[in-house]
Image (tube, grey):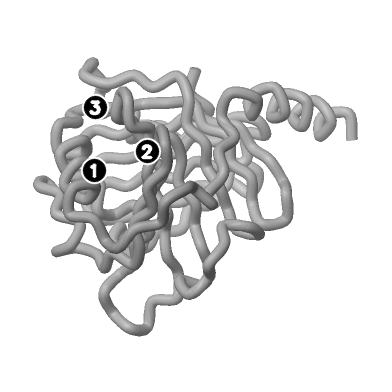
C-alpha cells in the first residue's frame, strides 16, 4: 500500500506539466499537412528516448523509460514498479515478466507502434488515418491498422512548437470517440540524436 501511494504521488507531480485534453478545439478533416509533419518528424529520428508515465484503463500507474533506435529497435522498460520490459527486435516483440521470469514473443507488427520500426515511415501506407484534430498548441492523429479485423486504434498527440510527440493513447475500440477509459502514455524529458548501444535492446534487467 505504501509503495502504491508513493507511485501515485510521483505520477501526480509528473502530470502537472503534461496533462492535455483530447477534446482539442477546431476538429478538422484528415489533414495532409499534419500527417506530413508527423512523418517528417519520425523519419528524422535516428535515436530517441524519454521517461514515460503510463495510466491503464483501470487507473493504475507505472513509470518507465522508452528507447527507440530506428529502424527495427524499440524498448519500454518499466521501472516503478519494475514488473516488465518489452523489446522489439528482429521483427519480434519479446515481453519479459520480471516477477515470473518468463518471456513471451509475438510479431513486432502486432504492436500499435510497429510503424516506428519501418525504415521509411509513411503513415497512410502502413495505417489508416481515422481522424486528425487541431488545437492551439498541439495536434493529434487517430490511426489503426488497415485490416477490418483490427479493433484497436492509437492516438498520437504532438506539441506544435517545437514539434514533439507528447503522448499516445491506446484505444481498445477504434470506434471510440473518447480517450477516456483507455491506456495513456505520457512522455517527458525527451532526448534524441545521441548514441544508444544495440546492447540496450538485449537487457531484460532494470536499466539505470
Q: Which residue is drawn at 88% across and 28% down?
A: 2
Q: Residues within 10 Å of mark 3 (few under 14, many from 20)?
A: some
Secondary structure category for the residue under label 1 = helix
Which of discs 3 and 1 lies nearer the camera? The answer is 1
Q: What element carries label 3?
A: strand
Circle 3 is placed at which residue position?
47
Judging depth in this view, the residue of 195 and 164 nearest the camera is: 164
Q: Which of 38/71 is in front?
A: 38
Q: Name the residue under label 1.
A: 38
Quarter of the image holding residue 15?
top right
The span from disc 2 to disc 3 (Cα, nearest Å) is 18 Å
Closer mark to the observer between disc 2 and disc 3: 2
Q: Horizontally, is 80 left or right of 130 in the view?
A: right
Q: What numbered label is drawn on residue 62?
A: none
In three-dimensional space, the C-alpha distance between marks 3 and 1, rounded to whole angstroms, equals 16 Å
Q: Position of residue 163 (x, y in %)?
A: 29, 29
Q: Which residue lies furthest to the right in this view?
A: 1
Labels 2 and 1 touching (C-beta < 8 A): yes
Instruction: Give the residue furthest to the left.
Output: 120
At which x and y percent is residue 12?
72, 28
User: Residue at horizontal 72%, vertical 55%?
Assistant: 58
Q: Residue furthest front?
A: 26
Q: Indicate whether 71 appears above or below 149.
A: above
User: How dense is the environment of label 2, judged by Cα within 10 Å: few (below 14), some, or many (20 and up)?
Assistant: many
- Under circle 2, the secondary element is strand
Query: If the image is split into quadrants, where does the N terminus sit?
Result: top right
Amino acid at each position: 500500500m505504501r509503495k502504491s501511494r508513493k507511485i501515485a504521488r510521483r505520477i501526480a507531480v509528473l502530470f502537472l506539466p503534461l496533462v492535455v485534453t483530447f477534446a482539442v478545439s477546431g476538429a478538422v478533416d484528415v489533414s495532409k499537412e499534419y500527417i506530413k509533419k508527423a512523418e517528417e518528424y519520425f523519419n528524422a529520428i535516428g535515436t530517441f528516448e524519454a521517461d514515460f508515465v503510463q495510466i491503464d484503463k483501470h487507473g493504475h500507474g507505472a513509470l518507465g523509460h522508452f528507447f527507440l533506435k530506428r529502424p527495427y529497435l524499440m524498448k519500454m522498460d518499466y521501472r516503478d514498479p519494475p514488473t516488465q520490459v518489452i523489446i522489439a527486435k528482429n521483427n519480434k516483440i519479446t515481453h519479459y515478466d520480471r516477477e515470473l521470469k518468463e518471456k513471451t514473443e509475438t510479431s513486432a507488427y502486432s504492436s500499435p507502434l510497429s510503424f516506428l520500426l519501418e525504415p521509411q515511415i509513411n503513415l497512410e501506407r502502413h495505417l489508416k488515418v481515422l481522424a486528425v484534430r487541431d488545437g492551439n498548441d498541439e495536434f493529434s492523429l487517430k490511426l489503426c491498422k488497415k485490416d477490418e479485423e483490427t479493433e484497436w486504434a492509437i492516438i498520437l498527440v504532438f506539441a506544435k512548437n517545437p514539434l514533439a510527440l507528447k503522448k499516445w493513447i491506446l484505444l481498445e475500440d477504434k470506434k471510440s470517440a473518447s480517450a477516456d477509459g483507455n491506456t495513456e502514455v505520457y512522455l517527458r524529458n525527451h532526448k534524441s540524436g545521441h548514441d544508444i548501444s544495440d546492447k540496450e535492446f538485449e537487457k531484460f534487467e532494470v536499466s539505470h
